[in-house]
Amino acid sequence: MKKTMPSVWCADVIVPVDPCAEAAGPASGDFWDAGTATVRLAGAGNEVVMFQMVVEGRPRDIGGLRFEGLKPLRAEVFQNVAIPIKDRWYDDALVPLDLCDAAGSIRAITAQALPVTGRQRQTFTVEIYIPKDSRAGEYAFSIAVRVAGVDHRLNVCLRVHAFDLPNEPACTADINNYSRSPGEGFEGALDDPARYLKIERAYFREARRHRAMFHLLPYTHAGRLEPGFAPDLAGRGNSRHVKDWRPFDRHWGACLDGSAYRGIHGGWTWPVEYLY
């Protein structure tokens, strides 16, 4: 007998959810109560808590997604995009949804993603930011999801502790990336510098949003320095000097003065921790 699945359920972010399995099987526990469709979270002020939301059905079946009773909390939702590894599909990239038009955003992301043969479900990563100085205690809100014309409700119970996390972490979570591109084979890094810089800056911002640092090393494993990292030099010997600081300032100025992080929750706008 085929296992009956709820249309919307939750899993921890470290749990790999197979998008093609006949039944992925949400298990009840401290985190998820299948009987009441409730996910339970806990965090402090100035912290981001997260979970996976799993929708049984293909992306085209999802007709809407909205939060109810969320304030004063803030939320972002990312569509998990799967890639094939051997004989299975695994979620890899997370693409932010436009919550003002979630259904349209899901369609647009799906159209650009690899088609998943035999897809049974779509997963999302939900991030909840708890503002500083939030009142300690229990918060409750819900996520309404329309699947194949039917509305489903996911309940969230969040316990906020009576303290705030400081803005700057006590240690640096260093996310290394070698060479110029944010991804191997990235097109447009040299042909369209403005587009490249916009994408590169987004990587720095996403790392900061998750209390980490995007550490973009300016060389390959062979030790070759990539163009666009160090200022161009001119002259020889004692006359050696920086030819023009402006390209360097355009590339790195916003990271070095912190303005690249403007608008990130909690005022996390300090300059990049270090730069090679």
Image (cartoon, rainbow, N blue to C red):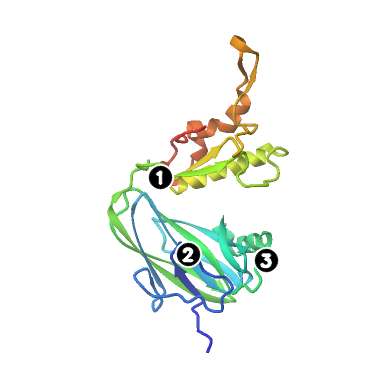
Mark 1: secondary structure: helix
Residue found 61% across the figure and 11% down from its top? 237
Residue found 50% across the figure and 66% down from its top? 16
Of marks 2 and 1, the one in the foreground: 2
Q: Is residue 260 above or below residue 61?
A: above
Mark 2 touches mark 3? (CB < 8 Å)? no
Q: Which mark is residue 266?
A: 1
Mark 2: secondary structure: strand
Q: Residue furthest bottom?
A: 1
- Residue 207 image position (x, y, % from top left): 49, 46
- Residue 240 image position (x, y, % from top left): 61, 14
Disc 2 target residue: 52
**Amino acid type of the residue tagged 3 in the rendering:** Pro
Taking the image as shown, residue 175 lies to the left or right of residue 114, namely left
Residue density around tag 2, few if under 14, some if 14–19, many if 20 or more, within 10 Å: many
**Amino acid type of the residue tagged 2 in the rendering:** Gln
Alpha carbon distance from label 2 to label 1: 23 Å
Residue found 45% across the figure and 45% down from its top? 212
Q: Tell which of 82 and 96 is nearer to you.
A: 82
Residue density around tag 3, few if under 14, some if 14–19, many if 20 or more, within 10 Å: few
Disc 3 target residue: 115
Of pointers 2 and 3, the one earlier in the residue sequence? 2
**Amino acid type of the residue tagged 1 in the rendering:** Gly
- Residue 225 image position (x, y, % from top left): 62, 32
